[in-house]
Amino acid sequence: MTSSPPATPVVEGWFTDGAEPALIAARCTACGDLVFPPTAAAACRNPRCAGEEHEAVALSRRGRVWSCTDAQYQPPAPYVAPQTEGEPWRPFALAAVELPEGLVVLGQVADGFGVGDLRVDSEVELVVEVLHVDESGPRTTYRWKPVAS
């Protein structure tokens, strides 16, 4: 029996996986300023802060749509289109989501949903889905899924 390789994130350290995935931000230990995606920079991005240390913190899994659009064109490399060979490229929706922490995070909308399923201020939750499969196996990314009202 051959087992399939485990799924790995497209970008390490940006989100957790599992039943309740979460985005990971960097929080300045001096002023509490949050940055997503997390940064390896030593200096705080807040110009009024001299802090140089950050800690990883999980962000809220739910937020509200701040804005949304659809991508009617295929982005250039290194983007990998989620398709089967021979199938045409399919547009996908993007949502800018405002989290309770005050950050607005841009991300793709979950498979099976488009801009017609979203409206400004509607609630969405974070999910992790396969973006594409390469020689190392499934590669995952975070996406926003509309919450049923």
Image (spheres, rainbow, N blue to C red):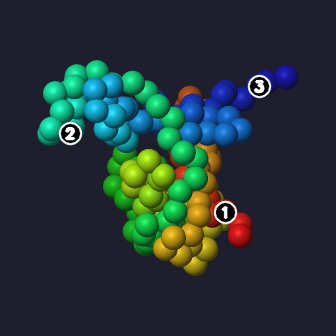
Q: Label 2 to label 1, Cα distance in Å?
A: 33 Å
Quarter holding the N terminus is: top right
**Three-letter amino acid code at disc 1?**
Val
Callout 3 environment at 10 Å: few (<14), some (14 to 19), or many (20+)? few
Q: Which residue is mark 2?
A: 46
Residue 29 placement, left or right of 13: left
Q: In front: 40, or 1?
A: 40
Q: Is residue 85 visible?
A: no
Q: Is residue 80 above or below residue 88?
A: above
Identify the disc placed on residue 3: 3
Judged from the image, the secondary structure of the residue bearing numbered disc 1 is loop
Q: Label 3 to label 1, Cα distance in Å?
A: 33 Å
Please state which of the two labelled residues, at mark 2 or mark 3, is closer to the viewer: 2
Q: Label 2 to label 3, Cα distance in Å?
A: 47 Å
Nearer the N terminus, badge 3 or badge 1?
3
Residue 11 screen position, x and y as percent: 44, 35
Residue 90 screen position, x and y as percent: 53, 67
**Three-letter amino acid code at disc 2?**
Asn
Identify the disc placed on residue 147: 1
Q: In front: 76, or 47?
A: 47
Please state which of the two labelled residues, at mark 2 or mark 1, is closer to the viewer: 2
Callout 1 environment at 10 Å: few (<14), some (14 to 19), or many (20+)? some
